[in-house]
Structure formats: structure tokens, C-alpha cells
Image (tube, rainbow, N blue to C red):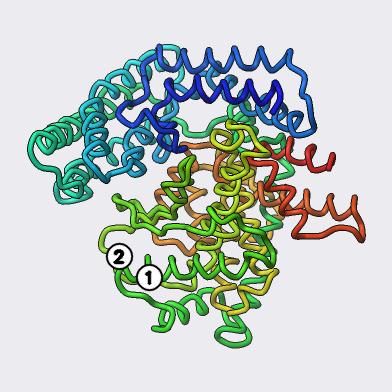
């Protein structure tokens, strides 16, 4: 480890006290009883740490090729973090999936719960919840006064989420958490008091969003080109031509839907439509599992099998990474997501499923590819392997660097890779993968189109409203026509795109850049190219922006 690595490790040590929530997310011990300062002073303190670190990086020379990559990665990530703060984005962003409120709520999902010390930490955080949200209100008020405020629709939708989280007949999140802990005596009383306080604070925050902030919110949800360019670069870690990417989205969706029609013919018969194939698969009892616990167990078995099959053949999977835990999330918003292991691997990597209320039947053909995406060779392999590589990567690289285009792009690439390796020979499972890919391609079109308010190409392959300009209403119509997602889930997805510009395309565009990087490596190495070696070298670089990734791979 050289001077760049020392600087990176120092950054982590100074960052953890400023972000106790983040410390819990990445598994750094010692901060589980605290919450982030979400007041204006808290945001300023975290931004100043970034400024100091960037200044030190500028005058520090790397001592090795590994440090050169680390320096490029830190300058790219921290530079964009600071740019978002200076533009007012970091402190004002409130949408249906990402905000200070969501961070504070979700940290409880990852906290240790065994033993009185762990339960006391939960109690401490619950009892700090209200004051943390008061600080966050101050930040949002200050940002709004400076002209930085989220769209009105997003603020109202998040207020509705607050209602659901505190509904005694719904998620009842905080009280449900305390009931699961099952503490008695003084500790039990502290937990119950904290749950009541956090519940009241969440309900009050929902009212704040509705009555105070929403009237100040932007009427138009479109981000505009300047804001979108920064968001796209942040989520990809790369600059892309947005207009070319928008046009590519139409081509890619048309290609995928042609493949889907061909697979539909294998499932139902020649000339069958995609919807006919979906109907046949959903009606197949062999592809249906009843009960969310049984479905969780099915996911666990498939994830374990993938690890066993791929280790020693297509990947060399470190011992610590050969364990993944499939979990049912304590909320019911329908999301599927991955959380990485703690630094010492005492908490394993986990695949979470937030089962929607009332859903009891699950179709396996849709989710085989999801398990590969969230598990191995997707997020779990990528994230957990990075955490293992202490001999190659500094602490910042292992714990704090996450780039959506790199991570989600890899996970989508991993789905396609499993098809290449023969794991999707079943036509139903293949259709599930293609359907997921088509869904991600559709949102490249819709996300860029809606936020830049682009014209829909007159010669688009779907004959969809040629010559008109994108609106949220047209985005809904297009997604309904090209995605097989329940209406309630699709509404959430569209709200997510409108409130989080640039994030949704990072999956498919990230996958595109990963494929381009593999093609470039093939061209450089010719007959010496080895796919397993390419994957090892790429993953050993850790998470980094996709532009720094391609530069680092070109130097290998």
C-alpha cells in the first residue's frame, strides 16, 4: 500500500463518523447506535471532507499501477459527489426510492439484532429518528429556498410511502421491528418508546412533504439536459452521447422483442405471440410456487447451486463469497435488491425480496435470471469479491466505491453470460431473461426521452406516436405496451424514473459498456484472450466508473 492507498484509508476513517448509516451499510463496526446528521451542517461537513481529499489526491502521485487505478476511481467518484452537492442535487433529492428518509428507514434492515447490545443500538437509533428528520427538514427547506426542490409529484408519492410504513394495518414498520426483537424490561420499554417516536416522526414527515414542501415542488418532472447530463455521468461513471444512446435504445428493444417472439414459438408453437407464451408459462403449475417462504427457499437453492456450479469452472470464487442469504424484506413495495456483506463477513451478502401485500403465488420462469442478477455471477460475486480483495484494493475501493453503471451493468451482463454458458436452455427461463432485458431497454428510451423531452423518432420500429414529444403520459403508454409488469409495480417504476433521472438506464447502458470492454480486450489480446481471466482481472479492479474501468483494462 502506498500514499494513494493511505489517503483512501484515511478518507474511510474520517467518513464513518460523519455517516454512521453508511458505516452500517458497509459493515464498519462502532457506529450502530448513531444516525447521520442530515441538517445543512451535516451535508456541509461531508462535502468538506470530499474537498480536502480531492485536494490531497491532486498532489499525490501513485506508486504503482494499482494506485493509479485507485486514484482515477477516487477522483472520478468524489469529483461527481462534490459536483452534485455544489449543484444542490445531493441535499434536495427526494424521490420514491432515494432520499435521506429512505436511508434512515432502511438502515434498520441491516442492523445486527442478536443480543442486548445490538437491541440497545436499535433502540438508540429509533429514539434519534425524530431529531434526525428535523435536521433533514431544515436541509430541505434551505435547499428549496435556494431553488433546489424535487418535483411535486415525487414529494406526494413519498408522503404516501410514509403512510404505508406507519399504517397499523399495513407494514407497521417500526412497531413490527420491535416485536421481532422481543426484548423485555427496561430495554423493551426503550424499544417501544423509540418505535412510537419514530412512527410519529415518520407520519409527521409525510405531512411536512404534503403541506410544506410539495407546494414548492417543481410542476414539471423532466430534469432537462444540463441536470440529466450530470446525473447520467454520475450513475454510469462515464460520459455517453445521450442522443445516440436514445436511438440505440429503440434498436436494442426491437432486437430483444424479435428474440422473444422466436422463443415464444418454442414455448407455444410457430407464430405464437409473446403474450401467449407468457400466459402459458403463468398457467404451468410446475413453474408456480405458493407461499413467500417457499419462494425464498427456492431462490436460496438456486443461488447456492449457481455458486457450486460456477466455482472452479468459470470463476474462482473466494471461500467467504460462497455464502449468500436470501431474505424476505420487512416492507411490501415489491422491490428485489442486494446488500453486501459486512467488512468481516459476519453479516453475509443478502438477496432481499419485498413481497407485495396479498401476493401468494410466484412464477419461477420470471425469476431464474433475477437470482443470477442478484447472486452469482451478478451482484454477490462482484460486491463480495471486492470486499475480500484486501491485498489488491484499499479500504475505500472495497467498502465505499459503488457505481450504478458498473454494478448494475455487470449484473445485467451476468444474466446474459449465464445464457452464453448454457444455464438458460429452458425456453421459459430464456424468455424471463429476455423480458427483463427488454424492460431495461424500454426504460433507456423512456428515461432519456421524458427527461430531455425528446421527439419520438418518426421511423421508430414500433410506430409509437411518431414525431410527438415525450411526456409522462406517453412514458406510461410505452411501458405498458412493452413490459409485462403488474400495473401497480409499473406505476412505481415510472415514478422512480421521473424522480431519479439517469439511474434506470445505467443497467442497460452499463451492460453495453461492459460488452464493449470485453470486445476491446478480445481485440487487444487476440488468440490469447481468455474469458475467465478477463472476468478475474475486471472484478479485481473493484467497483469504479466505467470510463476509468476501460482505461484500467487497456493498461493490463
In front: 214, or 4?
A: 4
Residue 451 seen in this snapshot: yes
Badge number at residue 359: 2
Instruction: Give the left or right position of residue 84, taking residue 35 as reference.
Output: right
Q: Which quadrant is home to the N terminus?
A: top right
Residue 506 seen in this snapshot: no
Image point 35% across, 40% down: which residue? 106
Q: Which quadrant is home to the C terminus?
A: top right
The quarter of the displayed image where residue 210 is located = top left
Mark 1 burial class by Cα count in 10 Å: few <14, some 14-19, many 20+: some
For the residues labelled 2 and 1, the Cα–Cα distance comes to 8 Å
Q: In this view, does 197 lie above or below 292?
A: above
| Residue 399 screen position, x and y as percent | 54, 36
Q: In this view, does 99 lie above or below 556?
A: above
| Residue 477 screen position, x and y as percent | 49, 54
The quarter of the displayed image where residue 298 is located = bottom left
Instruction: Give the left or right position of residue 22, taking residue 547 as reference.
Output: left
| Residue 139 screen position, x and y as percent | 37, 17
Read off the residue under disc 1. Answer: 362
Image point 84% across, 50% down: which residue? 520
* Mark 2 residue element: loop
| Residue 107 screen position, x and y as percent | 35, 37
Extreme residue in the bottom direction: 269
In front: 385, or 487?
A: 385
The quarter of the displayed image where residue 286 is located = bottom left
Q: Is residue 319 above or below residue 203?
A: below
Q: Contact (CB < 8 A) between labels 2 and 1?
A: yes
Instruction: Give the left or right position of residue 489, taking residue 443 as reference.
Output: left
Amino acid at each position: 500500500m502506498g500514499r494513494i492507498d493511505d489517503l483512501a484509508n484515511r478518507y474511510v476513517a474520517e467518513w464513518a463518523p460523519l455517516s454512521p448509516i453508511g458505516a452500517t451499510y458497509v459493515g464498519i463496526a462502532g457506529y450502530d447506535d448513531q444516525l447521520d446528521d442530515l441538517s445543512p451542517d451535516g451535508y456541509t461537513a461531508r462535502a468538506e471532507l470530499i474537498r480536502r481529499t480531492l485536494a490531497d489526491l491532486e498532489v499525490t502521485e501513485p506508486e504503482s499501477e494499482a494506485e493509479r487505478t485507485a486514484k482515477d476511481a477516487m477522483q472520478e467518484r468524489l469529483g461527481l459527489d462534490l459536483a452534485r452537492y455544489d449543484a444542490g442535487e445531493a441535499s434536495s433529492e427526494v424521490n420514491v426510492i432515494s432520499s435521506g428518509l429512505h436511508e434512515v428507514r432502511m438502515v434498520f434492515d441491516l442492523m445486527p439484532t442478536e443480543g442486548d447490545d445490538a437491541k440497545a443500538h436499535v433502540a438508540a437509533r429509533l429514539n434519534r429518528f425524530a431529531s434526525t428528520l428535523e435536521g433533514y427538514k431544515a436541509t430541505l427547506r434551505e435547499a428549496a429556498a435556494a431553488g433546489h426542490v424535487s418535483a411535486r409529484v415525487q414529494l406526494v408519492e413519498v408522503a404516501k410511502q410514509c403512510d404505508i410504513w406507519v399504517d397499523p394495518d399495513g407494514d407497521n414498520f417500526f412497531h413490527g421491528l420491535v416485536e421481532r426483537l422481543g426484548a423485555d424490561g427496561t430495554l423493551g420499554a426503550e424499544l417501544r418508546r423509540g418505535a412510537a417516536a419514530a412512527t410519529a416522526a415518520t407520519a409527521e414527515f409525510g405531512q411536512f412533504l404534503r403541506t410544506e414542501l410539495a407546494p414548492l415542488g417543481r410542476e414539471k418532472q423532466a430534469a432537462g439536459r444540463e441536470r440529466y447530463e450530470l446525473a447520467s455521468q454520475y450513475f454510469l461513471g462515464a460520459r455517453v452521447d445521450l442522443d445516440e444512446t436514445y436511438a440505440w435504445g429503440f434498436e436494442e428493444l426491437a432486437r430483444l422483442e424479435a428474440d422473444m417472439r422466436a422463443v415464444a414459438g418454442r414455448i407455444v408453437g410457430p407464430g405464437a405471440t409473446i403474450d401467449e407464451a407468457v400466459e402459458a408459462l403463468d398457467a404451468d403449475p410446475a413453474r408456480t410456487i405458493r407461499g413467500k417462504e417457499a419462494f425464498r427457499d427456492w431462490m436460496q437453492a438456486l443461488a447456492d447451486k449457481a455458486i457450486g456450479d460456477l466455482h472452479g469452472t468459470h470463476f474462482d470464487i473466494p471461500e467467504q463469497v460462497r455464502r449468500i442469504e436470501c431474505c424476505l424484506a420487512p416492507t411490501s413495495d415489491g422491490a428485489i435488491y442486494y446488500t453486501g456483506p459486512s467488512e468481516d463477513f459476519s453479516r453475509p451478502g443478502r438477496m432481499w425480496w419485498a413481497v407485495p401485500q396479498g401476493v401468494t403465488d410466484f412464477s419461477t420462469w420470471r425469476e431464474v435470471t433475477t437470482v443470477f442478477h442478484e447472486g452469482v455471477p451478478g451482484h454477490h460475486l462482484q460486491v463480495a469479491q471486492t470486499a475480500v480483495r484486501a491485498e489488491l484494493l484499499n479500504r475505500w475501493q472495497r467498502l465505499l466505491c459503488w457505481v450504478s453503471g458498473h454494478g448494475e451493468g455487470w449484473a445485467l451482463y451476468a444474466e446474459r453470460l449465464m445464457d452464453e454458458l448454457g444455464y438458460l436452455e429452458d425456453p421459459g427461463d430464456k424468455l424471463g431473461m429476455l423480458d427483463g432485458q427488454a424492460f431495461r431497454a424500454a426504460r433507456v428510451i423512456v428515461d432519456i426521452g421524458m427527461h430531455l423531452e425528446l421527439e419520438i423518432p418518426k421511423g421508430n420500429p414500433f410506430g409509437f406516436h411518431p414525431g410527438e414529444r415525450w411526456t409522462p403520459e406517453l412514458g406510461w403508454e410505452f411501458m405498458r405496451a412493452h413490459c409485462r409488469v403488474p400495473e401497480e409495480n409499473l406505476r412505481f417504476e415510472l415514478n422512480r424514473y421521473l424522480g431519479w433521472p439517469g439511474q434506470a438506464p445505467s443497467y442497460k447502458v452499463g451492460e453495453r459498456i461492459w460488452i464493449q470492454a470485453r470486445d476491446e480486450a478480445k481485440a487487444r489480446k487476440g488468440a490469447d484472450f481468455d474469458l475467465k481471466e478477463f472476468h478475474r482481472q475486471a472484478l479485481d479492479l473493484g467497483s469504479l466508473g466505467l470510463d476509468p474501468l476501460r482505461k484500467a483494462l487497456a493498461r493490463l
